[in-house]
Image (cartoon, rainbow, N blue to C red):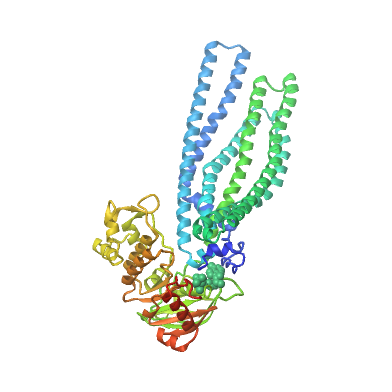
Amino acid sequence: MTTTPTQAHADPGAAPVRAPAGPPGTPGRLPLADRAEVRAWTGAFVRGEAARLILTFTLFAAALVAGLIGPRLLGHLVESVKAGTTAGRVDVLALIFVGILTGHALLARAARTQATLLGERVLARTREDFVRRVLGLPLSEVESVGTGDLLSRATTDADRLNESIRQAVPRIALAAVTLVFTFAAILLTSPLLALGLLAGVPFAVVSTWWYRPRATRAYERLLAQEADVLAVTHETARGAATVEALRLGPRQVARHGDAVDRVVRTRQRTTWLQTIWFPSLDLATMVPMALTLLIGGPAYQRGAVGLGELTAVVLYVQALGEPLNDLLTWTDELQIGNAALRRILGVDRLPREQPWPAPSTDGHAIRLEGVGFGYGPGREVLAGIDLDIAPGERLVVVGASGAGKSTLGKLLAGVHHPTRGTVRIGGADVTTLPVSRLRREIVLVTQEQHVFTGTVRDNLTLACGGDGDEALPDERLWGALEAVLMTDWVRSLPDGLDSEIGPGAAPVSPSTAQQLALARLLLSDPHALVLDEATALLDSTASRRVERSLAALIEGRTVISIVHRLDSVRDADRIAVMDRGRIVELGSHEELLAAHGAYAALWHSWDSARRAGARPERRTSG
Ligand SMILES: Nc1ncnc2c1ncn2[C@@H]1O[C@H](COP(=O)(O)OP(=O)(O)OP(=O)(O)O)[C@@H](O)[C@H]1O
């Protein structure tokens, strides 16, 4: 069985998955961006959204000022009543008070709407940029890290960043401005009473100084561990058939349980840190309140402050509690956003696809010279492979499970790059060919074919021209469908080529998905194909149908087929027999039979099983 990257992660016995190249990260995980990169992103974000940011902050500040006038007005009202005022004047002041409260509510609503729009814009752009970055990575890099980490960065981490920008940034700005304004209002009302505020400073500063670095580390750990949970879930769902076939269910459940346990432990740690920090913040507001009253009482008795001033200051000090709490707790939220941003931007640290122009190729011959490859350091799964494949040749690769057949296929198609030696197509080293160019030369067809949510037309045309927006005439689409025997199926759909298919729309069986993929390949028209057990997962009827469709595709192309069943090996020009990462025999069916080597033994055992009417051994290894 071919080991998929996710299985390799799951299997403790498998060779270690290559850690992503580039700056430090945990092996097998994507790297994190550093502070400078986060600062650069933040600078670009502030510059790009300057107008919207200014509007949002202005609205928040206006709402805040409206909110601050309230206590002042109430203090004035108390003074007026004490001095003996008319009921009419009290009514006017009360009306103004209600008007200010309404204005405050409306401004606050407008400010929140702007903040939400800002957050959504950033979320959309972050996700788009992220997908663009990931699509720009070499396939081998994406394969080596697995999809769980990538998925969590594109989903949960992007959501967290959005939440930070939508909620934390305006709330922090608002809280900071509120604190400054309120403090200024207290100073202006009574500098003496303002002294009481100083008592809160040590509680806020010392507890935050203790809390912050511990929380940062815990949040970074938490996000990575949440990514692990997603990775196990995704891996299990993706490999459901393998999990069921190998009865890996309990093992996957245990792995998931372990991953969840780690998240729970880190959450307990962050909650514990907060149980120390939050009460300290409460003290930072309660102690100044008590002190203001302690100073204010005697000061009022001595006539140093008026009753109105004392009322206003007490209300202001009480009002300080909320912004102070907001400031500190939202900076905590911002830390989570910061950790999420480091993860999102970290993808940029992986080596990109080579930007240089495609080297010129001369013909379509494929040549492997001294090729070696290992998935991790220390263990080569391919060693010293030399092979020439002529244009139009049909080569079949057979060998025991784990011999390296699929790995060879991936190297031929440029999915992985050799760790030594070279793979050349038309004289050009495949590692120097940009993917768009390489895919015109050679494509790997495996047993797993993806149906994209969209129309039949979308699914057929997306491989042509790279971005799928090149209009291909319907005749060509129908021509490709006919070649892979799919016209009846498409005609049976309600809207023909424009019928929606895939998840949630018309169901597509595995064999139909495979045929659709073959039609897509016909349209993209590569010179060579590597067929890695393209029909192995299908039942025999479906498999025969796909094989008939394949016949149209392989016509006139170089074809390298990796097979387990020997049914069609006789039609091949040559057969390569692999054993432990090497090609041990190479020649035509007749030549290899005459050589009485590994292939001859394989063939005779397979042939006699077939003649005896027994189900032939699926594995060519026997
Ligand atoms: N992504 C991977 N990470 C680590 N090791 C891998 C990975 N893929 C394959 N291997 C290992 O490389 C060796 C060759 O595997 P490969 O899949 O190429 O063999 P194969 O001949 O195609 O086997 P099969 O017939 O079972 O598909 C095996 O030991 C396998 O465990």
- Give x and y (percent) for residue 479: 26, 65
Q: Name the residue nearer the viewer: 399 or 558.
A: 399
Residue beneath the point at 59% across and 25% down = 71
Q: Residue furthest left?
A: 475
Residue 81, horizontal then vertical, whole percent: 60, 14
What is the number of callouts on the image? 0
Residue at the location (59% across, 38% down)? 175
Q: Position of residue 5 (x, y in %)?
A: 53, 65
Is 326 located above or below residue 526 in the figure?
A: above
Q: Quadrant of residue 381?
A: bottom right
Residue 515 seen by the camera: yes
Residue 136: x and y in percent read 46, 63
Residue at 58 percent of width and 56 percent of height: 252
Viewer-nearest residue: 180 or 503: 503
Residue 258 vertical position relative to residue 385 in the rendered view, above or below: above
176 left or right of 112? Answer: right
Q: Is residue 464 visible?
A: no
- The structure residue drawn at horizontal position 60% and vertical position 34%, both measured from the top left corner, is 181
